[in-house]
Amino acid sequence: MLFLSIKPQYARKILDGEKLIEFRRRRPRSNAGDWIAIYESSPTMALVAVAQVAEVRIESPKCLWRSVQSVAGITKAEFDGYYHGCENAVGIVLKSITAMPDPISLEDLRAEWPRFHPPQGFRYLGESESQFVLSRIPKKNRQPTVQS
């Protein structure tokens, strides 16, 4: 499971369905169907949702923006600023976005995972960490989606 740290304004747009793609400069080792834990950074500092990867797209910034601008949840200026000087842009297309019924605070994460520090960008969770996260969402939302 990929653990993403996301600024509060963008995490809220993901939860509202306005932002269906997460932009990164580096490609994570995630594939379609993999789970993502969405951690809302300061001041919230809590794991607020999970989602699944629909696809990971790697394109020039110009091509990526042209194809995803309607679901980007950010302005063209924000996008251009983030990818300034980059040859490639990574877009993680999200599906099955599920808010945590009770967000897991940083304090609770550290109680479960001693010495845990949220990453600036992303990190990978181990099997037991992933199971802990998935156990906190309704069972009906944990079923893997069928790949077509």
Image (cartoon, rainbow, N blue to C red):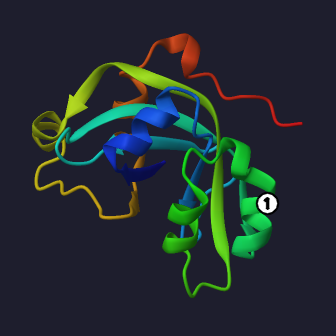
Residue shown at 59% from the left, 70% from the top = 27
74 horizontally vs 104: left or right: right
Quick one: 65 or 139, which is closer to the camera? Answer: 65
Task: Determine whether the residue tagged by mark 1 lies in a helix, strand or loop.
Answer: helix
Quick one: 20 or 48, which is closer to the camera? Answer: 20
Residue shown at 61% from the left, 38% from the top = 52
| Residue 116 place in picture, x, y as percent | 17, 54
Residue shown at 81% from the left, 55% from the top = 67
Work out whether 107 lies above or below 79: above
Q: Amino acid under label 1?
A: Arg
Residue shown at 24% from the left, 55% from the top = 118
Residue marked by disc 1: 66
Residue lying farthest right?
A: 148
Q: How many marks?
A: 1
> Is any part of residue 26 visible from this angle?
no
| Residue 81 place in picture, x, y as percent | 50, 73
